[in-house]
Image (tube, grey):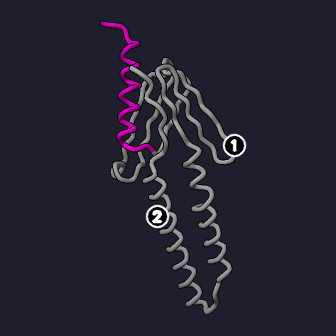
């Protein structure tokens, strides 16, 4: 079996995060607008602050967070690179992995909110926001490597 290659987070997950953030912002703006009508005062500075915060998160932080995350899986090692302002690389040998868990959420096929958890002795590596097909590939590859190590009974 050869190397699997590099996996990036699902774009659908980022879009769902965008939609949830926009929905939360719309609810907060509605509450502020209702409060302004009831109190007969317009807290426009709060709405502008919230809008600038949402734009900062949606325009700067989230794309950088999703673009900086990658997972490379080869025959012998797993490299997970992530980070927002500083890049952090986590290395785990495939031989150290004792079990693998695939977490597929109810709408994971469309939303991209799927995770793979790699368990090793004293360590755990969570690979978030993967497409379901990527989760299946990773789990199959790691499980086949684990089965190769186990002696015949």
Name the quarter where the N terminus is drawn. Answer: top left
Give residue 103's position: percent from left, percent from top: 39, 40
Residue shown at the point (47%, 38%) measured from the top left? 7
Query: What residue sits right under mark 2 in the picture?
Result: 19
Outermost residue on the bottom side: it is: 40
Quadrant of residue 123 within the rendered picture: top right
Residue shown at the point (62%, 71%) measured from the top left? 50
The main secondary structure of the magenta stretch is: helix
**Residue 150 falls within the magenta-colored stretch:** yes
> CA gap, disc 1 to disc 2?
27 Å
Density class for disc 2 (Cα within 10 Å; few <14, some 14-19, many ≥20) is few
Decide which of tag 1 and tag 2 comes sooner along the chain: 2
Specify whether 81 is left or right of 115. right
Give residue 69's position: percent from left, percent from top: 56, 42
Residue shown at the point (35%, 28%) measured from the top left? 140
Q: Is residue 60 above or below residue 28?
A: above
Specify whether 74 is left or right of 152. right
Density class for disc 1 (Cα within 10 Å; few <14, some 14-19, many ≥20) is few
Residue shown at the point (59%, 44%) measured from the top left? 68
| Image: magenta residue range | 130-153
Query: What residue sits right under mark 1 in the picture?
Result: 86
Q: Secondary structure at mark 1?
A: loop
Give residue 132's position: percent from left, percent from top: 36, 42
Give the camera-side residue of 85 and 103.
85
Specify whether 42 is left or right of 139. right
**Residue 56 falls within the magenta-colored stretch:** no
Q: Is residue 128 above or below residue 124?
A: below
């Amino acid at each position: 079996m050869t190397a699997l290659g590099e996996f990036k987070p699902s774009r659908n997950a980022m879009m769902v995060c965008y939609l949830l953030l926009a929905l939360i912002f719309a609810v907060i703006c509605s509450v502020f607008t209702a409060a302004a009508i009831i109190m007969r005062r317009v807290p426009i500075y709060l709405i502008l602050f919230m809008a600038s915060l949402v734009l900062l998160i949606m325009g700067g932080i989230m794309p950088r967070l999703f673009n900086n995350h990658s997972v490379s899986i080869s025959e012998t090692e797993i490299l997970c690179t992530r980070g927002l302002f500083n890049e952090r690389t986590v290395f785990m040998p495939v031989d150290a992995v004792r079990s693998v868990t695939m977490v597929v959420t109810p709408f994971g096929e469309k939303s991209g909110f799927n995770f793979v958890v790699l368990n090793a002795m004293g360590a755990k590596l969570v690979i978030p926001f993967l497409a379901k097909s990527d989760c299946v590939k990773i789990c199959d590859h790691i499980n086949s490597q684990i089965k190769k190590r186990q002696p015949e009974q």
